[in-house]
Image: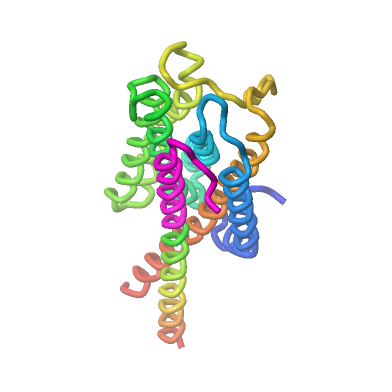
Amino acid sequence: MIPDLGNYAVEVMSAYVLSILLLVAIVAVSLRRGRKVRGQLVKIEARKESANV
Amino acid sequence: MSIWEYANPKKFIATTTPLVPWVLGVAIACLVVGLVWGFFLTPDDFRQGSTVKIIYLHVPAALMAINAWFMMLAMSLIWLVRRHHVSALAARAAAPVGIVMTLIALITGAIWGQPMWGTWWAWDPRLTSFLILFLFYLGYMALWEAIEDPDTAADLTSVLCIVGSVFAVLSRYAVNFWNQGLHQGTSIPVATGERTISDVFFVPLLICMVGFGLLFLALVLIRTQTEIRVRRIRALEIRMRS
């Protein structure tokens, strides 16, 4: 399945693994923080609404 | 309709929210296709062997690391001239994405350099200016965190961004300015269009470059929306306390 990378298998594999890990991490962190902040805003706006009523 | 309408936070969120899933989806599709194609279906280079497969990560990441800084520069200038908060927040949102791209370019460059040049690192003009760009990213993010007043933070980070742009330019053109160092010049000169890279490698590379570009765009949109909401939460909290 994995192509024959010859003498450079460690270099090529480590470059791919590290880069993909970093990309996945920045996507996950961005989405998670976005969801968390959106939830906080909904809560605080609801609190404000109820205070106004 | 003016482009400045999008400087309205509500309008920005309303316009970008439906776009984000599409941009992110196409970005991931391009990355999967480009990286699978590059890794599994391209031959080894006659001189570099299988290390040429690192090109599909290194080049797009380096391209985006530099372009992210230029995008931050444009947003910073808009903030300084027109005082649109969304532009300052977009610049802030882009920095963590830019630093990840810079880190990927530095790591893959070192891993690629070791077998090809016999060293992980050299104080070559291009590499050195790229490392300084990485430090500027760190400084930029630290400055945003260090200053409590958001407008002052936006002002000072904008000035830092303008100064750091020198190293973004050098990262790209240092090879042309100083004809020395280990790093080669570009294989895809946009100005002349005379590529020195075969289509076998170029097509998956192009797909990866599009994928990295769209991923950057999607992440900046998501993170800018988050920064706008954080600002709104802070404003509401202050209003409710008083």
Number of marks in the image? Answer: 0
Seen in the picture, residue B235 relative to A52 is either above or below; the reply is above
Magenta segment boundaries in residue numbering? A1-26
Residue A2 colored in magenta in the image: yes
The residue nearer to you, when weighing B79 against B137, is B137
Quarter residue B43 falls in: top right
Q: Residue at x 43, y 55 (%)?
A: A26
Q: Residue B74: x and y, percent? A: 53, 38
Q: Residue A35: x and y, percent? A: 46, 69
The residue nearer to you, when weighing B46 against B94, is B46
Q: Residue at x 66, y 29 (%)?
A: B198
Give the position of the C terminus of chain B as an image quadrant: bottom left
The residue nearer to you, when weighing B235 against B210, is B210
Q: Main secondary structure of the magenta part?
A: helix
Q: Residue B116: x and y, percent? A: 43, 26
Seen in the picture, residue B48 relative to A50 is either above or below; the reply is above
Q: Residue B132: x and y, percent? A: 35, 30
Residue B167 colored in magenta in the image: no
Regarding residue B10, the answer to whether it shows in the image is: yes
B97 to the left or right of B25 = left
Regarding residue B163, the answer to whether it shows in the image is: no
Q: Residue at x 37, y 36 (%)?
A: B134
Q: Residue at x 34, y 26 (%)?
A: B119
Seen in the picture, residue B168 relative to B215 is either above or below; the reply is above
Q: How is the image coloured?
A: rainbow
- Outermost residue on the right side: it is B1
